[in-house]
């Protein structure tokens, strides 16, 4: 008898917890006290949560920390430990989104990463919270035009996909991405839309935002500091092979920073610094073979009352992978041999700092199941002027939900 009573109590508690957790407002009294944000936690709309967790190991690399973060500026390679020593690292991200009807959509993308300096703001271990997307999107004309406002990834090109550690083919950022000086995040407005005509279609996206007042992530601020906005746009075509072939064209321009008249006359800060960039990218799936590539060309236009000069940058990246179905043998669903080549030729204000970077990466990815991947790659890095011993082996385990 007592056993039945215990079982009945457990069933009753489980039923109560389920009922409370799913679909009930925890503030169910009309006059009940609420926390300040209580109105935002009522279950008034459908929402979803997705994310990933990365565990990374990188081998010893004698001069990894030298060479201007290997050509791409802070935060560098993000999930690769920023140390010469053999070391472990981690990267986590979460996406929270909600549909507030047929036309309104809100989302946030939050990353918990290691600060490259090793001294993070979020707690022990040098951890730092990074908010890469937080915006609302309203569909003005179904399919053809939507309006977004908030924080979002730059819409220029496809290189920003490599910052997301659970979907990139290699763990390192391609050097070529350094040809676009402001390829991090933007705060402003964004317009996008698409056309679907069966086997072919195209989409378009453009944004106008605060821009930057420095070359790297340190120039991303809460508000505009240099009296100029940044424009980015991309048009993407699917020319008859459905999603198997996609070609994109991108454009970006804006002011990086205005002249600092108190700066030294022989420094780059003594100039107004405008940039302009063009890009072309492609993704091509040929049965089990996948090709991905992009080319970025940019110019910094420096000027003051006395003179003007241009600093040019050119980056190209190409990567290839091939899926081998292993049919679950040894617990592996598929094996992906992979190769990447990329190059960055970038002029600096000081010619002695200018350099040409090149990376060759080879490796294997093992798909254990749909949402669990083990990645192995070795990366050979070469500099044209300043020779560094910074080749590196990297192992990554990625799981997403």
Image: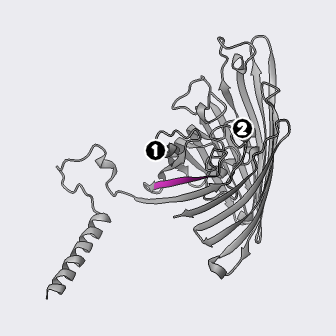
Q: Earlier in the sequence, mark 1 or mark 2?
A: 2
Give residue 221's quadrant in the image: top right
Residue at 66 percent across and 51 percent down: it is 162
Of residue 197 and residue 171, the one placed in the foreground of this image is 171
Please state if 161 lies on the left or on the right of 289 as rendered.
left
> Height in image: 296 above or below 19?
above
Residue 102 placement (x, y as % from top left): 47, 57
* 136 vs 376: above or below: above
Residue 11 seen by the camera: yes
Q: Residue at x 67, y 45 (%)?
A: 84
Q: Is residue 53 above or below residue 336?
A: above
| The residue positioned farthest toward the bottom in the image shown | 1
- 318 part of magenta stretch: no
Which residue is rendered at x = 52% and y = 29% of the image?
223
**Which residue is the site of mark 2?**
66
Q: Is residue 332 above or below residue 136?
A: below
Which portion, as a residue range, is magenta? 87-97
Is the residue marked by circle 1 packed among few (<14), some (14-19), or many (20+) residues within 10 Å?
few
User: Element at badge 2?
Assistant: loop
Measured in 3D between alpha carbons, the distance from the residue under mark 1 to the one under mark 2, in whole angstroms, is: 25 Å
Q: Toward which corner of the image does residue 314 lie, by quadrant?
A: top right
Q: Name the residue nearer the viewer: 229 or 131.
A: 131
Q: Which residue is mark 1?
A: 124
Circle 1/circle 2 CB separation < 8 Å? no
């Amino acid at each position: 008898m007592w056993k039945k009573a215990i079982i009945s109590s457990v069933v009753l508690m489980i039923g109560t917890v389920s009922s409370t957790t799913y679909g009930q407002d925890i503030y169910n009294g009309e006059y009940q006290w609420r926390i300040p944000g209580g109105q935002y936690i009522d279950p008034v709309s459908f929402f979803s949560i997705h994310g990933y967790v990365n565990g990374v190991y990188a081998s010893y690399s004698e001069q990894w920390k030298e060479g201007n973060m290997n050509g791409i500026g802070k935060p560098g390679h993000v999930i690769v430990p920023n140390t010469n020593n053999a070391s472990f690292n981690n990267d986590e991200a979460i996406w929270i989104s909600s549909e507030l009807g047929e036309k309104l959509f809100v989302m946030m993308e939050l990353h918990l990463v290691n600060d490259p300096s090793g001294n993070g703001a979020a707690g022990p271990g040098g951890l730092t919270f990074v908010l890469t997307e937080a915006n609302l999107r309203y569909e003005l004309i179904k399919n053809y035009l939507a309006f977004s406002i908030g924080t979002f990834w730059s819409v220029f090109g496809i290189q920003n996909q490599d910052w997301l550690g659970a979907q990139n083919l290699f763990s390192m950022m391609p050097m070529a991405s350094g040809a676009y000086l402001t390829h991090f995040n933007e705060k402003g407005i964004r317009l996008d839309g698409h056309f679907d005509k069966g086997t072919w279609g195209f989409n378009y996206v453009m944004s106008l935002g605060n821009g930057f007042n420095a070359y790297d992530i340190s120039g991303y601020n809460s508000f505009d500091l240099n009296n100029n906005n940044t424009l980015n746009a991309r048009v993407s075509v699917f020319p008859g092979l459905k999603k198997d072939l996609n070609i994109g064209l991108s454009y970006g321009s804006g002011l990086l920073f205005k002249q600092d008249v108190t700066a030294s006359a022989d420094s780059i800060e003594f100039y107004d610094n405008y940039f302009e960039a063009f890009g072309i990218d492609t993704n091509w799936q040929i049965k089990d073979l996948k090709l991905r590539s992009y080319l970025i060309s940019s110019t910094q236009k420096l000027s003051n009352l006395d003179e003007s000069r241009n600093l040019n940058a050119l980056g190209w990246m190409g990567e290839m992978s091939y899926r081998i179905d292993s049919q679950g043998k040894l617990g592996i669903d598929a094996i992906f041999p992979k190769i990447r080549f990329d190059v960055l030729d970038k002029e600096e204000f000081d010619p002695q700092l200018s350099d040409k970077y090149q990376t060759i990466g080879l490796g294997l990815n093992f798909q254990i199941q749909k949402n669990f991947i083990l990645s192995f790659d070795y990366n050979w890095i070469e500099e044209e002027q300043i020779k560094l011993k910074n080749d590196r082996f990297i192992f990554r385990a990625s799981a997403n939900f």
